[in-house]
């Protein structure tokens, strides 16, 4: 015979269900935000690569970046990511990391501003990669990353590079919170704003 429905389940069983669902929801949110970040970083790398290639092959000067910035801003007025300064960062990013595979494996694991900080403050590629790895593993905010670079953490700890952790960042980490609230993400994909209020909705 079928069991009689229980109007009020035992607290232990109910909270086990609730906690399991909360973990799944947070995991889905983390995966979605990381996917958006990856697409944005890849887009910026591709734009930077195109600018760099045209300048090298056709001798275009720096003025082309100002013109591109105006035209892209006209086409995408709600996105701040196409300022002349940011387009120059994209070019520098593509020049610093010519291998697209690197962008997939490392650069796309951290927010764009973290990448810009590394371009500014760390010139050695091996050291940059080490700081990316440490940022992902420890969930560093950009301010913490800057502090660690300026304190010479790479030199003090020996800078050994290991394989990246395959686990997702903690939803509570500073890195994850910055990814969720990153204004570049909000402009690139406006429904990410729902994460701020815990309102998990997409347009489809």
Image: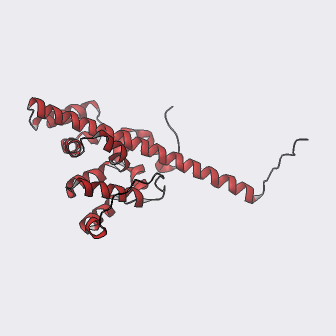
- Above or below: residue 199 compared with residue 144: above
Q: Is residue 30 visible?
A: yes
Looking at the image, which is closer to me, 84 or 150? 150
- Left or right of 165? Residue 56 is left
Q: Position of residue 188 (x, y in %)?
A: 36, 39
- Above or below: residue 71 compared with residue 126: above
Looking at the image, which is closer to me, 53 or 80? 53
- Above or below: residue 128 compared with residue 63: below
Q: Residue at x 25, y 51 (%)?
A: 116
Which quadrant of the structure image shows residue 74? top left
Q: Residue at x 31, y 61 (%)?
A: 145
Q: Residue at x 12, y 34 (%)?
A: 56
Count of all numbered marks drawn on residues in the image: 0
Of all residues, the one furthest to the right in this rendering is 1
Q: Residue at x 26, y 55 (%)?
A: 126
Q: Quadrant of the N terminus?
A: top right
Q: Position of residue 28 (x, y in %)?
A: 53, 45
Looking at the image, which is closer to me, 9 or 138? 138
Q: Position of residue 17 (x, y in %)?
A: 68, 52
Q: Position of residue 110 (x, y in %)?
A: 36, 51
């Amino acid at each position: 015979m079928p069991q009689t429905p229980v109007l009020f389940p035992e607290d232990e069983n109910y909270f086990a269900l609730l906690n399991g669902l909360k973990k799944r929801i947070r995991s889905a949110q983390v995966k979605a935000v990381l996917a958006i970040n990856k697409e944005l970083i890849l887009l910026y790398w591709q734009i930077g690569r195109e600018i760099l290639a045209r300048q090298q092959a056709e001798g275009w000067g720096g003025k082309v970046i100002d013109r591109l910035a105006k035209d892209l801003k006209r086409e995408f007025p709600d996105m701040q990511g196409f300022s002349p300064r940011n387009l120059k960062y994209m070019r520098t990013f593509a020049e610093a990391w010519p291998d697209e595979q690197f962008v997939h494996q490392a650069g796309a694991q951290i927010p764009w501003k973290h990448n810009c900080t590394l371009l500014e403050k760390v010139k050695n590629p091996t050291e940059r990669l080490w700081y990316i790895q440490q940022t992902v593993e420890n969930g560093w905010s950009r301010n913490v990353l800057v502090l660690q670079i300026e304190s010479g953490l790479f030199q003090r700890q020996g800078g050994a590079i290991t394989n990246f952790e395959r686990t997702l960042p903690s939803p509570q980490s500073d890195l994850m919170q910055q990814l969720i609230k990153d204004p570049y993400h909000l402009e690139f994909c406006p429904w990410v704003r729902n994460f701020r209020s815990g309102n998990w909705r997409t347009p489809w």
